[in-house]
């Protein structure tokens, strides 16, 4: 679709009562999104804009979005670039990811939630726990608490599910255990992060006993 069609879709979503415009993995179309937003804003778009991404973002691109994005929702997949290179083919994931998350927080600050319980502005980090601690939850939590903000809102996710060629990369060839998930939550709390998304804490999804 062209920018006018995208702008019209955003306005339609707002008119239907959506809480925000959620752009999923939009990095490669940032110029087109900005063009559409200019049209939509002039026509009355006012709901928050969410930048929902994998967290592997350039600072140059993020600075184009300053004052435009209301809510950044990045993944923090790995705390160790050696692990990231083995399992995701990115040699510098942790360094790029951390710099990006710091820039996101600089722009929008800690997550603010309105009286309805709806996110209005700020940073919301997603972290998928992997078997045998491969995601490095403790190091990610330490970084967020010490270098970003101890009030960072983090969703510690339990739904890792092995598929495709996961059997070639043990321990990713198995699901997560309950103990591994609970240890990840404990690590976040130990490092001072208390704003945890608790939806999955009582009964994490797709776990092995």
Image: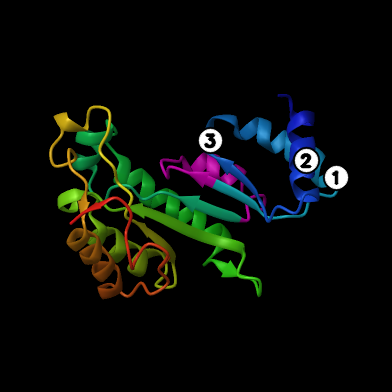
Residue 19 vertical position relative to residue 28 in the rendered view, above or below: below
Quarter holding the N terminus is: top right
Residue in the image at 41% along x and 62% along y: 154
> Does the CB distance between marks 2 and 3 fall below 8 Å?
no
Q: How many marks?
A: 3
Instruction: Kindly identify which numbered label has been placed on residue 27.
Output: 3
Q: Residues within 10 Å of mark 1 (few under 14, many from 20)?
A: few
Quarter holding the C terminus is: bottom left
Residue 129 at x, y percent in the picture = 28, 53
Cα separation between marks 1 and 2: 6 Å
Q: Secondary structure at mark 3?
A: helix
Question: Quarter of the image holding residue 122?
Answer: bottom right
> Does the CB distance between marks 1 and 2 fall below 8 Å?
yes
Residue 162 at x, y percent in the picture = 25, 38
Q: Secondary structure at mark 2?
A: helix
Which residue bears the numbered disc 2? 38
Q: What is the magenta range?
A: 52-70
Which residue bears the numbered disc 1? 42
């Amino acid at each position: 679709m062209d920018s006018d069609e995208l702008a019209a879709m955003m306005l339609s979503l707002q008119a239907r009562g959506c809480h925000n415009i959620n752009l999923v993995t939009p990095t490669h179309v940032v110029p087109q999104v900005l063009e559409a937003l200019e049209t939509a804003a002039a026509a009355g778009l006012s709901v928050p804009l969410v930048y929902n991404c994998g967290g592997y973002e350039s600072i140059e691109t993020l600075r184009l979005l300053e004052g435009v994005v209301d809510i950044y929702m990045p993944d923090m997949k790995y705390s160790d670039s050696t692990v990231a290179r083995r399992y995701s083919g990115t040699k510098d994931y942790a360094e790029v990811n951390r710099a990006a998350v710091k820039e996101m927080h600089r722009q929008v600050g800690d997550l603010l939630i309105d009286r309805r319980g709806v996110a209005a502005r700020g940073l919301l980090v997603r972290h998928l726990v992997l078997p045998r601690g491969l995601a490095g939850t403790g190091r990610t939590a330490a970084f967020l608490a010490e270098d970003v903000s101890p009030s960072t809102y983090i969703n510690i996710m339990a739904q890792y599910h092995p598929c495709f060629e996961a059997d070639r990369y043990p321990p990713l060839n198995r699901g997560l255990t309950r103990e591994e998930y609970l240890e990840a939550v404990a690590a976040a709390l130990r490092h001072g992060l208390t704003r945890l998304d608790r939806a999955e804490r009582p009964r994490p999804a797709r776990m092995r006993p």
